[in-house]
Structures are given as C-alpha cells and as structure tokens.
Image: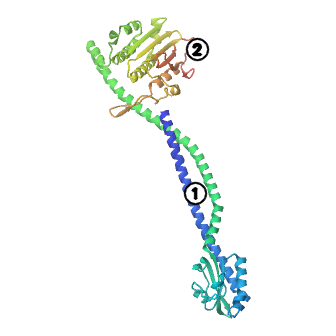
C-alpha cells in the first residue's frame, strides 16, 4: 500500500502544482488585462482633457482674438501656435478663420487651405473632443470656437497623435508589469505553502481511507471463509458424532492433503518426534511443494519433546504456518524446482523458527514494508468477484511475536532466497526477561 501511495504521490503533486500555476496565470493575465484597460481609458481621458484645456486657453488669448480675421493673422498667430504646441507638449495647433481656412499649421504648405476634417461643430459655437484622421495622421483632438463680441470668428484646434498615446500606454504598462509579476510570484508562493499543508492532510486521509478499504475487504473475505469453515466443521462433527471416522478422514482428505509424509520418507523421518501441530503444518506444506516438484526439509530440535508440545502453542503454529506458506509462494513464483528449509528449535527460553527458501528473496529496501498490513509483492486474486486481500500474514507474525516479547528478522538465505527468523519467548517461563506480553515492542531487524 505504501508503494502504491508513493507511486501516486508524484502525479498528484504535479497535478496540484499545474492547477495552482494555471489559476495564478489566469488571475495574473486577467489582472494585467484589466490594468491595461483602466490605463488606456485613463490616458485617453487625461489626454482629451489636456487638449481641451490647451485649445480653450488658446482661443481665449487676447492676441488670438485680436489677430483672427486680420490680413497679417498668419504672421502673428503662427509663432503663438508653435510656442503653445511646444510648451503644452501637443503634436499640432491649428487656428482657422470663420470659414475653416487654416491660419496656422505645423506644415507651412498646409496654411491657407481648408481643414481636412469637419469644422462645423466648433464654428457652430460648440466644443468637440474625439479622434479624427487629418493631414498629420490619426489624432485625439479638441476643437473650440474663437469668440469676439459674441460672434464665432474662427476655431482653435489642438491634437495629439494616437501613436503618442500608444507610447504613453506602453510606458504605463511597463510600470505595472513588475507589480503584477510580483503579485503572481507571491500568489504562487502562498498557494504552494497552502497546498503543502493541505496536501499532507489529504494524504493522511487518503492513507487512512485506503487502509480502511483494505480492512473492509479483509473482513469480508474472513467472513466468507468463516462461513465456509463452519460448514465443513459441521459436516465433520456430524460424521464423528455418528462414529463414521473413516468417512470423516476421507472428507478431510478431499479438503487438504494429509498423506504427504508417506510420499516423502526423509520428511517423515524428520518429523517422527515432532508435535502434532508441527507435523500437520509441514505435512500439508510438503505435499504442496511435491505437487510442483519442490522439496521441504525440516529440522526439529528440542531439549524435551513434552516441553516442545507445550511451547509450540497456537500462536507458534500461526507464525510457522504463515512463514512456511510465504516461502512456498516465493518458490512457486520462481517457476522452477525449489527448496524450503524449516528449522524449529525449542528451549526453556522459548521457540525459534527459521524458514529459508530458494525464491527471489526480499529486497533490502522493502524489508521494513513487507510486515505492513496491506503491503504485498504478490499479484491480487479474486474469488466470486471479491478481491482477496494480500499483505496480512507477515503483519500477523510480527504482531504475535511482539505480543510475546519476541521479534522477526528478515535477511538473505544461503539458499539464495529469503530467510525469516521468528522468536517467541516462552510466556510460561518466569525467568525469561521478555516473556511478558507487551513488555517491549516487536523487534524487527532487517539488515
């Protein structure tokens, strides 16, 4: 399960970062576009107001009012127009007479000609502010009437090229861009920090949810197996109760092989003095291996057979059964003839079980993970549409050993595969320092 989460963690993080980057990028572009629009509107309004102020001030100058309509108006007004254009920072200043004939113009050849745009608004006594295309190009211009004694005697027109306005906008943009980029970087940093905090919480929730799902499937599978075993026990109980022992044995043989010792004299000899529990576990394991051409080797040692019977209790049987079953699975996965070697040693201090195999072994980097509930290197299997949970046996072994004050050691075997060594201190021996359940956590040494 940890390996699956590690495999998923990379894509999840990349996806989260991509989403954050996209959101910040969209926000940044939106902000930039809004800022550009605001700046564009502001610049045009400011430019129009400036042009109108300059044109109004020019039209109200006494020198302009007095000169318009006189024979030498051009000589008098052109210097004034040039000075106003330069000081106000506008691109042109044009003064016309009451018929729209230019008195002043930045291009001398254009003086004395009719204006290229409609002067009727200003000649009608109104002001005009807008964009028009004239002889110098597209300009944002202001036109105002020139009054004398309540009569319109001409117009004053002030214009600023649209290209100049665009340059102003570009300058404003470069002033805004650093702030937008700074805000974007700050947003990314803040989003990354938030995602790190929330990501850890979500990851813990994902781990808990996956563990819960594993436990749910395990419970479902165990309920199914419990029901199946209960039915079988009822059949056996019925046969034994009516004294049909032969039929009971035949029924047991249909469920699991129990005659393997006869097929393997060496194993039979090794288990001759072994307790019933050990004989039953290793006999079934030997048969399973023989079916695939494998060999089970057993070495049972004890100071006292009666003590071994007492020391090898249900907990020890569960541990041995799981270790041997895992070893056989590993050998079968190789697809070739394999060996499983089992050594059980019982002393006054407790029981030591060692299982070696010729399988692929357990890689050093995952030896700490193989005892986690739900972690497994085996392929998943299904029965009746229900996925059979994996990664239960070794976790159970470690828990049992820990409750007895023992441990589980995983190393490389001299046979080429894995070696599992489980120690279960004898809880019936007062002198054993680690014999009390829960006296210490499970020892898990995985060199």
User: How far apart are labels 2 and 1 at the CA level?
Assistant: 68 Å
Say which label, 2 or 1, has the lower sequence index. 1
Is residue 11 visible in the rendered structure shown here?
yes
In the foreground, 352 or 426: 352
Decide: few, some or many residues near mark 2? Use Cα within 10 Å; few <14, some 14-19, many ≥20: few
Query: Residue 234: which quarter of the image?
Result: top left
Question: How many labels sit on residues?
Answer: 2
Q: Which quadrant of the figure contains the C terminus?
A: top right
Decide: few, some or many residues near mark 1? Use Cα within 10 Å; few <14, some 14-19, many ≥20: many
Is residue 205 visible in the rendered structure shown here?
no
x, y percentage for residue 12? 50, 43
x, y percentage for residue 169? 62, 67
Query: Residue 387: which quarter of the image?
Result: top left
The residue indicated by pointer 1 is 28
The residue indicated by pointer 2 is 433
Q: In this view, does 406 lie above or below 46?
A: above
Q: Is residue 247 left or right of residue 143?
A: left
x, y percentage for residue 385? 34, 34
- In the rendering, which numbered label is found on residue 445? none
Q: Is residue 217 above or below residue 121?
A: above
Choose mark 2 or mark 1, whichever is in front. Answer: 1
């Amino acid at each position: 399960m940890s390996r699956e989460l590690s495999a998923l963690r990379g894509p999840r993080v990349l996806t989260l970062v991509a989403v954050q980057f996209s959101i910040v990028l969209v926000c940044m572009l939106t902000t930039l576009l809004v800022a550009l629009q605001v700046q564009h509107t502001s610049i045009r309004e400011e430019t129009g107001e400036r042009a109108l102020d300059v044109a109004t001030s020019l039209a109200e100058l006494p020198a302009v009012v007095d000169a318009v309509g006189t024979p030498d108006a051009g000589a008098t007004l052109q210097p004034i127009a040039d000075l106003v254009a330069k000081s106000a920072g506008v691109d042109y200043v044009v003064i016309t007479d009451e018929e729209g004939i230019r008195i002043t113009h930045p291009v001398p050849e254009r003086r004395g000609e009719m204006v290229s745009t409609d002067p009727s608004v200003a000649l009608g006594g109104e002001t005009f502010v807008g964009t028009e295309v004239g002889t110098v190009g597209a300009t944002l211009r202001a036109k105002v009437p020139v009054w004398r004694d309540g009569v319109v005697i001409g117009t004053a027109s002030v214009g600023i090229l649209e290209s100049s306005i665009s340059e102003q906008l570009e300058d404003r943009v470069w002033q805004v861009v650093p702030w937008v980029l700074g805000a974007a970087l700050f947003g990314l940093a803040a989003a990354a920090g938030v995602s790190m905090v929330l990501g850890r919480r979500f990851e813990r929730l994902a781990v808990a949810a996956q563990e819960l799902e594993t436990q749910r499937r395990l419970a479902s599978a165990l309920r199914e197996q419990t029901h199946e075993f209960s039915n079988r026990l009822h059949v056996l109980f019925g046969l034994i109760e009516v004294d049909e022992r032969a039929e009971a044995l035949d029924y047991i043989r249909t469920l699991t092989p129990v005659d393997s010792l006869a097929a393997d004299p060496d194993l039979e000899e090794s288990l001759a003095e072994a307790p019933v529990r050990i004989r039953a576990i290793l006999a079934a394991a030997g048969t399973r291996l023989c079916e695939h051409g494998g060999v089970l080797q057993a070495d049972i040692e004890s100071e006292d057979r009666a003590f071994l019977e007492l020391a090898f209790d249900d907990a020890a049987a569960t541990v041995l059964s799981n270790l041997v079953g895992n070893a056989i699975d590993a050998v079968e996965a190789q697809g070739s003839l394999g060996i499983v070697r089992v050594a059980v040693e019982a002393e006054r201090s407790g029981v030591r079980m060692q299982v070696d195999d010729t399988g692929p072994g357990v890689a050093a980097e995952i030896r700490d993970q193989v005892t986690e509930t739900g972690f497994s290197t085996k392929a998943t299997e299904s029965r009746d549409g229900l996925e059979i949970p994996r990664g239960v046996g070794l976790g159970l072994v470690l828990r049992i050993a820990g409750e007895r004050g023992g441990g589980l050691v995983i190393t490389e075997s001299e046979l080429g595969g894995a070696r599992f060594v489980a120690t279960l201190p004898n809880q019936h021996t007062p002198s054993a320092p680690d014999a009390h359940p829960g006296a210490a956590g499970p020892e898990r040494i995985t060199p």
